[in-house]
Amino acid sequence: MTDLHVVRVFCGPDGGGGNPLGVVRDGGAVPGRAARQALAGELGFSETVFVDDAGRGTVDIYTPTLRLPFAGHPLVGTAWLLRHLGEPVEVLRPAAGEVAVRYEKERVWVRARAEWATGRTPQQYASAAEVDALPAPPPGEGWLYAWAWADEAAGRVRARGFPRRIGKRGVSRSGGAGACTGNIDEDEATGAAALQLTHELGRALDVRQGSGSQIVTRPAAGGWIDLGGRVALREVRRLG
């Protein structure tokens, strides 16, 4: 028996939006990749995180179909939850490498590398209205990150993320094209895609994604990118 905390990551300024994330604080209660993968599939969130060592920040991330070495919204959400539980961290350690954590007023920030977040294809549209008008999901295969400038001078982006199924689902160590997220037609907030877009554009962004989510990014020295957002607790469930 253990608890599952469900949080909403990258909430908007009004507290709405946010991508649901499941976090198993006591990762040792679900040992082994097979059991973790099965639970992530059963829960159906775009990602579920197992905290293996809160003190060291060791975490294990799963979509409903595979394990990921890195993902943005799970790390922001887990960092927030650990602070909420009285265990703030300075670093998280997913399989990809060390991710620095910073707490700043209502936002949590993580520092990561764009190359950890490959496989999501940013496609620019002419206007935010065109992005809003897309069906969920649009035709085609592979992860699509549809975006347009809402205010280019201010760095404000309108985006939507579609984890479309690919013809042959492969296991990707990068969380790339093989990172199928089960039956989810549209991802409410996608930190990894925001990292990629920030890297491509080379500037800080204020991304408004989904129905009301906000993701903020800032390029940092040495190829690092800071990824930040608000988090809110949705519920606590008992597993077992």
Image (spheres, rainbow, N blue to C red):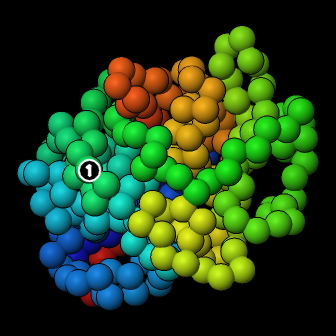
Examine the rendering and report whether any part of residue 13 can be seen: no
Residue 179, compared with residue 74, is above or below; it is below
Residue 112, located in which quarter of the rendered image? top left
Residue at x 29%, y 65% (from the top left corner): 60
Work out whether residue 75 or residue 24 is closer to the camera in this orientation and state it. 75
x and y percentages locating residue 12 in the rendered image = 58, 36
Examine the rendering and report whether any part of residue 65 can be seen: yes
Residue at x 43%, y 54% (from the top left corner): 71
Residue assigned mark 1: 97
Give the residue type at disc 1: Gly
x and y percentages locating residue 139 in the rendered image = 86, 66
Left-right relation of 84 to 140: left
Left-right relation of 127 to 229: right
Left-right relation of 42 to 111: right
Q: Determine the secondary structure under disc 1.
A: loop
Residue 137, compared with residue 209, is above or below; it is below
Quadrant of the image for the N terminus?
bottom left
Left-right relation of 85 to 172: left
x and y percentages locating residue 153 in the rendered image = 72, 11
